[in-house]
Image (spheres, rainbow, N blue to C red):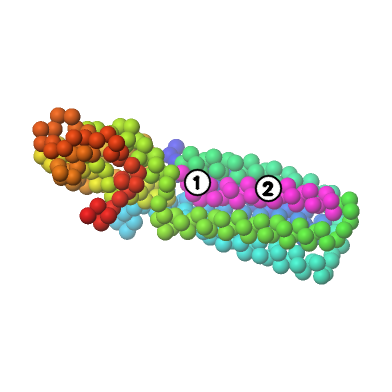
Amino acid sequence: MNGDLIKLKVQKRIVTFSVILLIGKFFAFFITNSVGILTDAMESIVNVAAGFISLYSLHIASKPKDKGHPFGHGKIELISASLEGLLIIIAGGLIIFEGIKRLFEPAVIDKLDIGIYIVAGAGLINYLLGWYSIRIGKKYHSIALIAGGKHLQSDTYSTIGLVIGLILLYYTKIAWIDSALALIFGSIIVGTGIGILRKTTENLMDKADPEILCSIHDTIIKNREESWVDVHNMKVLKYGSNYFMDCDLTLPWYYTVQEGHDCCVDFANLIKGKYPDRIRLSVHTDPCIPIKDCAFCPMKNCIHRVDDYNKDNLLTLDKMTQDDDSLI
């Protein structure tokens, strides 16, 4: 089974469990009338809505590229994660509003012990679902699954505090504790949503990914061939679970077209071997300029050399990511 189908299967499982947990939490709210438990139930509405959005986005992302979408449909996952972040912020705001309202209009709370058991059990299941979603998301490079998993786990962390607060409320009978719980965890939920939005916005704006750039740089340095005089103008674009890389490869000026082509093939195979089936690579060749490039060129038997090779001239990441304008 390919990665896209696995991601869809995982998301279907998460949505199914989210619906069951939603029903359980609202049952706990109706029997207890606790606004603290309501915070957990409302966030479950977000879990379910976000789950269906993610499911749809993964379905779209799994479609192959076509004439209208030559880079595929992967960025739909970023839109999905952004919508999830917005829903989380809205839910957190509603929870805070309800918490403030209950400060001035206290309500009778009943059967809190049953509610605590339900919320605690749901929190444990949420954590396991989140761990599962993040694990599969990282394995198959799905930002939608990772965002959903982090959301589920943040829900669990807030549930732990909520359960502690509910236990305190159960034994002390102090009414304002219920409202305080809603205000605290509503704020945490809003913060989670803002964090997801920040991450997806960076990806939608094609912000450079230092981790992938460093990984590619290390791969090139460890496997550099003598004829690779220089690599520059390197850009890597993340598009869903795929990467699109573009760079300029400087080769000896006297190489034939065939020799240059062979060098590009070797270079491309090296990068693709690091990221099989997930990277699309475009390599442009430049001829070396002896008076400028000899000091950087490691070729030992070059008869056209006009300057000695200086081993201190490292092919750094900064140099690789320089664009043509900065080299002029």
Q: Quadrant of residue 49?
A: bottom right
Pick whichever, 274 or 115, lies toward us.
Answer: 274
- Neighbours of disc 1 within 10 Å: few (<14), some (14-19), many (20+): many
Quadrant where the C terminus is found in the figure? bottom left
Residue 244 visible in rendering: no
Identify the mark nearer the N-term, 1 or 2.
1
Horizontal side, residue 59 vs residue 262: left or right: right
Residue 231 screen position, x and y as percent: 26, 43
The answer to whether residue 165 is magenta is: yes
Along the horizontal axis of the image, is 311 left or right of 116?
left
Q: Is residue 163 left or right of residue 52?
A: right
**Magenta segment:** 141-169
Numbered badge on residue 8:
1
Tag 1: amino acid: Leu
Q: Residue furthest top?
A: 301
| Residue identified by numbered label 2 | 157
Image location (x, y in percent) of residue 30: 79, 58
Which residue does the image show at 57% across and 53% down from the upper left?
A: 51
* Residue under the image location 24 percent in, 35 percent down: 310
The amino acid marked with disc number 2 is Tyr
Q: Secondary structure at mark 2?
A: helix
Residue at 89 percent of width and 51 percent of height: 171
Q: Residue furthest right?
A: 172
> Would residue 235 be visible to someone looking at this image?
yes
Rendered view: 16 above or below 273: below
Whole-percent x and y of residue 189?
65, 57
Task: Name the front one of labels 1 and 2.
Answer: 2
